């Protein structure tokens, strides 16, 4: 949130409008993206100033789709949005790394369980052989 507070226009006190900035990840069947939103509250009504989606591309730079607003509006709020955006982008990148680590750990756990089951099976066979002799 930004804004709010009292300001003076022509020696008359007025309350500044509030602005809310939101960033959140989205995921479709083929791609992930990051949504950037700027909303301004004026006289009790919400006015959406910016709604953009950044889509990382496999080849080339990321693509930004503007559903509301444009590049100029993004640059105006871009300073604050980029400050908010950087940690979210890092978390999204880390999520991919954690998913890969989880997959590797699951494979290692499955291999250990298989080895343990084989060891127990061999012990049972040896026990049965000793009892029969």
Image (cartoon, rainbow, N blue to C red):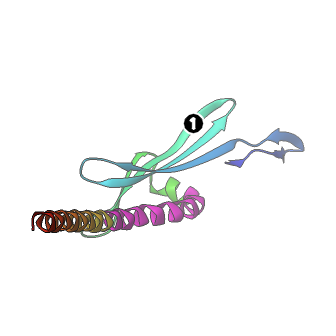
Residue at x 36% of width, y 63% of height: 96
Residue at x 34% of width, y 63% of height: 102
Query: Is the residue 22 above or below the residue 98 in the image?
Result: above
Residue 110 rendering spot, x and y as whole percentages? 25, 62
The residue under label 1 is 47
Pick whichever, 30 or 83, lies toward us. Answer: 30
* 133 on left or right of 88: left
Query: Is the residue 76 above or below the residue 10 in the image?
Result: below
Instruction: Check residue 80 for magenta coloring.
Output: yes
* 112 on left or right of 4: left
Residue 116 rendering spot, x and y as whole percentages? 25, 66
Residue at x 40% of width, y 66% of height: 93
Q: Residue furthest front?
A: 133
How many numbered discs, if any?
Answer: 1
- Are there few (<14), some (14-19), or many (20+) residues within 10 Å of tag 1? few
Instruction: Check residue 86 for magenta coloring.
Output: yes
Residue 44 rendering spot, x and y as whole percentages? 68, 29
Q: Which residues are magenta?
A: 76-102
Query: Is the residue 86 above or below the residue 64 in the image?
Result: below
Pick whichever, 63 or 121, lies toward us. Answer: 121
Q: Residue furthest top?
A: 44
Residue at x 75% of width, y 44% of height: 4
Secondary structure under the numbered disc 1 in the rendered image: strand
* 90 on left or right of 98: right
Q: Quadrant of the C terminus?
A: bottom left
Pick whichever, 5 or 114, lies toward us. Answer: 114
In terms of secondary structure, what is the magenta stretch mainly?
Answer: helix
């Amino acid at each position: 949130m930004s804004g709010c507070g009292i300001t003076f226009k022509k020696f008359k006190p007025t309350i500044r409008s509030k602005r809310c900035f939101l960033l959140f990840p989205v995921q479709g069947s083929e791609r992930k993206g990051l949504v950037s939103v700027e909303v301004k509250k004026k006289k009790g009504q919400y006015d959406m100033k910016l709604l953009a989606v950044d889509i990382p591309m496999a080849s080339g730079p990321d693509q930004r789709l503007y559903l509301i607003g444009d590049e100029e509006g993004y640059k105006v709020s871009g300073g604050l949005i980029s400050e908010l955006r950087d940690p979210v982008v890092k978390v999204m990148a880390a999520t991919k790394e954690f998913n890969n680590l989880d997959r590797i750990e699951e494979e290692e756990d499955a291999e250990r369980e298989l080895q343990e089951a084989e060891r127990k099976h061999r012990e049972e066979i040896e026990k049965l052989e000793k009892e029969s002799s």
